[in-house]
Amino acid sequence: MTETDIETGTGTGRRPARLSARDLTLAYEDRTVVDGLDVDIPDGAVTVIVGPNACGKSTLLRALGRLLKPARGSVLLDGTELARIPTRAIARSLGLLPQSPVAPEAITVADLVSRGRQPHQRWWQQWSDADEHAVTEAMTRTDTAALAERSVDELSGGQRQRVWIAMALAQETDLLLLDEPTTYLDISHQVEVLDLCRRLNHERGRTVVAVLHDLNQAARYADHLIAMKSGRIVAQGAPSDIVTADLVRDVFGLESVVVPDPVTGSPLVVAGRPWGAGD
Amino acid sequence: MSAAVPISSPRSPRVRRRVGWTAAAVVALLAAVLLSLAVGARATAPSQVLDALWYGTPGKATAVVRDMRLPRTVVGLMVGAALAIAGTVLQGITRNPIADPGILGISHGASLGVVLAMTLAGVQTLSGYVWWAFAGAALASVAVYAVAARGRGGATPVKLALAGAAINALLLSVVHAVLTTHAAVLDRFRFWQVGSLPSQDTGIAAQIWPFLLVGVVLVASVARGLDALALGEDVAKGLGQNVATVRIVGGIGATILVGVGVAAAGPIAFVGLAVPHIARAIVGTDHRWLLPMAALVGPVMLLVADTVGRIVFPPSEVPSGVMTALIGVPFLIALVRRKKAVAA
Amino acid sequence: MTLSLARPAGYTLVRAGRASFLVHRRATAVALALTLLLAAACLTYLCAAQSYVAPSEALKVVLGQPSPDELTVGTFRLPRMTVGLLVGAAFGVAGALIQTVSRNPLASPDIIGVTQGASALTVGALTFGVTSYAYLPYLSVAGGLLAAALVYVFAWRGGLHATRFVLIGIGFAVALRSVTNLFMTKGDYLVAQQAKVWMTGSLADRGWDEAVPVTWALLLLTPFVCWAARAQRTVSMDDDTATALGIRLGRVRLGLALLGVVLASIATGAAGPVDFVALLAPQLARRMTRTAQIPLLSSALTGAVIVVVADLLGRKLFEPTQLPVGVLTAAVGAPYLIWLIIRGRTGGKA
């Protein structure tokens, strides 16, 4: 991957961010997961949300993508509350890949990817040139064109994940939210997907928000890193500014050493005191 | 952490709750039995009931309780348990929450057996129907399994369910066709078809208990397998279960139990469908708890329905098949609504 | 080459100016074949339902030309066949919609309480003194809708969860069937007899007075069915993905279920609860077209073929005894479904 220069600021810019949350409180039934959270997603940047399991990072992403209704507060898209925008209109500017999507039975790859065009289609416009172009490009970019005729049921986990990403890409939205997009992928495909996010951002100026498990991948690919713990944002900013041994101890409760990544120079977290290394 | 109680230990609240509920179900069953013995056109006091049972003091009360209500109650116990267990197993095997002996064609297999007994063999007695009902149920389930097991993927839940529905449809149309063309058979069959507990001693209980026993043993032997199957076929295999064996043994057990139920009381709807859901809402999805709970709740439902049916419109009786549904539906709806997500 | 890869497999693109349509080739072929089959079945019905009429004469009557067989074909057979055809189509579509919404191939209007609601109200009315047959269709439509409304009210809990919907539907179905049985034991023998005939599902004595309202009702619903055919595609996705694509899944499901219920109620009103058409037709159609979702047009055509053929067989098979159409619908559809399952090209997917 080539080093990309980041022109955009990290949320401190002049214009208000397109996607933001104000006083956001999120709850499942009676369990509050996120309480009174404010966040701005910097435009035209790759934002990665990290944090330990059950810290509310996926919940936050779901709320940003209107999959979860806030118990209090609001998510704003271009200054308007999400709840006030027709869901179809949202779907034309904000794409979303949920954590474990379920494909309709016996559907083919091309058919599934083309479902991403749904927000752009009308009953009398079922397949335009734009649709064809977007689907072709999405499949080419995710390296799934060769699978087009296969049934999604018979794909491997990694292939399936790439098909789902292709579907989200075919939606052609300025904002793209990805919930753990690298799950099920081997190391080379993980890198490929993350490179893809970067390229989308770099070449198309798309805003990407992803939840990732791997702190090092997050630090490597994010312009803007949000670290969460128990429903709160502990730190946010450029990875090189905020990823320190203190932060890792604070957020993950893990002793570590932070060194510069030998390839990119971004912070690299090396876990300290492994088992058997002596006290 | 040091004070953690293992989930399976008798002290864990989960197990205690299950034991508590099971005890409550046993009490409810005893109450239902007593009610079934005491209530009717001629009301009998509980003390008289016990007197009649234990000492057999000669008299009208003893005659009613011993010769009419006792056999009826015993059959109700057996049929309720048999249908409830069969329903639980069939829902487990097909992993379809609406699978029950009725929808899967087994009941109608038994019906067809009875219709043929009436038309071809001229069988007139209830005890004569038993064998035909069994044969019909068995043939229907073999047919369902044979159809579902062919083709790609073997007997998957969806194929089992669909094959059951198709065979069911076919059987019912044959039954209808025979009935429409044989008026005399229709006259006898329509009473059998509603489903009701026999109002006098027909010696049926003595005939069916061995089958009940065999069915219960077969089903109990695959309880663990059904738990594993609920997690999906791959996981079940991973847990060392032979999926096909679980399905076949469970299916045979369920068929025998349905045969027992239908032979003794006609195709009583709803017990096989609703009781598993009610039991699941009470003790959860572990089949080692679920099956006994179903076996307790099934007879309670059937006996209470039967007892109420005797007294709502005197002097005529409302068949237990009808009352079961009227009493059971509110329960089912309340339970289904209470749960956030319904377990399949 | 790359361009054609992007288009979903099996579809042909039809364009007219800015408008564009995707046509599933196999589904279209199946629909055409079913239309031909239906036409053949209808012609056979008109010619051979009882006494033989030459096809040429039958066609003349259909086209409104004078013919000596005007009375037999035009007054008796044609309206009865029309009712059968429409009822079959309505049940086929209703079944397809309810199976789609519930994601359960076993679900159909006869299982979730619609037909039982219709039966309960109709039989109740017969038992408690309604003697005019003219009201019965309306009563049964009302009964079906009422039952569906109850199911919906009890099943709704912040959304229409598929399994909860089906289970509560079954609960109501069983309870209503019991109520119906109770009514039948309360009324006198003749009423029970009438009710029994109605409940088997019959097309006997259906004339233009019955055929015309059903035709209008279904014509009015056609635009909604067209909407459903497209909306149905989206229901097969999971909730999160559908929301991400800008689909209001809750509303779409509700709309589809409502349409299915209305269609089933109308069909039940016209012919009584004709068993199994709603269950069998969609499964047969899906297996024939091999599409990912249940095809509505083919379901409608399959349903129509099943009912017309079943009624014809019911009249011919045991002459002079006439079997009600409900007896034979399963005999016509089920063997074919069994054969399709055994052959298992689609791998047994719902």
Image: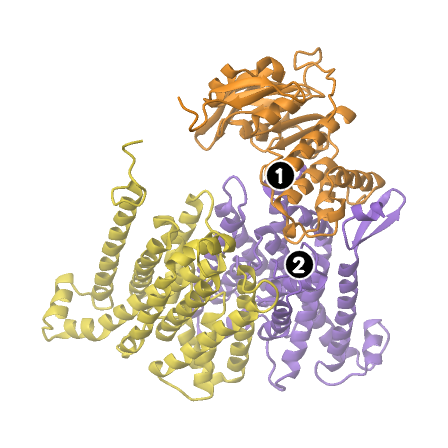
Q: Position of residue C151 (x, y in %)?
A: 51, 51
Q: List the single residue furthest toward the right.
A: C17
- The reply, left or right, for residue C188 in relation to residue A6 is left
Identity of the amino acid at label 1? Asp
The answer to whether the residues at label 1 and label 2 have Cβ atoms under 8 Å apart is no
Position of the N terminus of chain B, as image quadrant, is top left
Residue drawn 65% across and 79% down? C313
Chain identifier, orange in the render: A
Residue that numbered label 2 is attached to: C93
Q: Position of residue A53 (x, y in %)?
A: 49, 30
Which residue is nearer to you in this view: B199 or A221?
A: A221
Q: Position of residue B64 (x, y in %)?
A: 19, 73
Give the Cα distance between marks 1 and 2. 45 Å
In this view of the protein, can residue A165 be seen by the observer? yes
Q: List the single residue furthest toward the bottom.
A: B121
Chain letter, disc 2 residue:
C
Whether C22 is drawn above or below C347: the answer is above
Mark whose residue sits in front, 1 or 2: 1
In this view of the protein, can residue B331 be seen by the observer? no
Whether A269 is drawn above or below B339: the answer is above
Where disc 2 sits, the SS reads helix
Where disc 1 sits, the SS reads loop
Which residue is nearer to you in this view: C267 or B243?
A: B243
* Chain C representation colour: purple
Chain identifier, yellow in the render: B
Residue that numbered label 1 is attached to: A186
The local crowd at label 2, few if under 14, some if 14 to 19, many if 20 or more residues have their Cα within 10 Å, is many
- The reply, left or right, for residue B161 in relation to residue C343 is left
